[in-house]
Image (cartoon, rainbow, N blue to C red):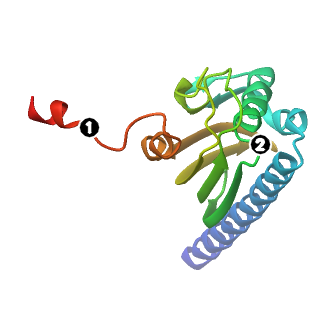
Amino acid sequence: MRILTLTLLCLATAASAADMADESSRNLELLRRYAELGRANDHAAQAAMWAPDAVNNGRPMDNDEIRSQLEDLRRAFPDLSSTTIETTAKGDLVIVLQRTSGTHRGVARTGVYGGMLRGATPAGKRFEVLRAHWWRFKDGKIVWHQVVSDDLSMMRQLGLIPDTLSADKLEK
């Protein structure tokens, strides 16, 4: 009886690991397709890949808000691009480390980048920073996304904040 129980447990564990690997592969493919749609500027199709009650960077957002933010990113940075450095997938979670760059050529209207770019006059300067994204999927849709980004460095590179404090600020 013990051998049968151990055998069944091993089979169940193997099946569970295979299911997780299949889920990881499906989610990696969904994310690949999402990036492809972004490169094609098909933001409506990208937004349709999100669940209607998805959470993006801590905020519930519907598909229209997601589409609007994606369009705003492209408006502010028409040449926005990312190169993937590393990807890890486990079940419903995909983690991606990327190097992202773009040239500030348009005025942002939404809260992308925490709203720091909203209304900022573009100076045509380029940025390049690292970003880490966490994506969660359920039933073939993005249900949760969080990004950690070096936005301070980006803002400095774009000339929107100074690289250093002025001497009079340091003395105080």
Left or right: 69 as drawn, with respect to 119: right
User: In front here: 113 or 14?
Assistant: 113
Residue 144 can be seen in this image: yes
Earlier in the chain: of badge 2 and badge 1, it is: 2
Identify which residue is drawn at 61% across, 37% down: 123
Q: Amino acid at mark 1?
A: Leu
Q: Which residue is mark 2?
A: 78
The answer to whether 161 appears left or right of 136 in the picture is: left
Where 109 sits versus 26, above or below? above
Residue lying furthest left:
172
Which residue is more in the foreground, 138 or 50? 50
x then y, percent, for residue 163: 36, 44
Position in image of residue 152 (x %, y %) = 43, 41
Q: Nearer the viewer, residue 119 or 26?
A: 119
Report whether residue 94 is seen: no
Residue 35 drawn above or below residue 90: above
Q: Measured from the top left, where is residue 105 in percent x and y?
A: 70, 37
Amino acid under disc 2: Pro
Q: Quadrant of residue 118?
A: top right
* Residue drawn 60% across the image and 59% down it: 98
Rendering quarter of residue 166? top left
Dot label at residue 165: 1
Question: In which quadrant will I find the C terminus?
Answer: top left
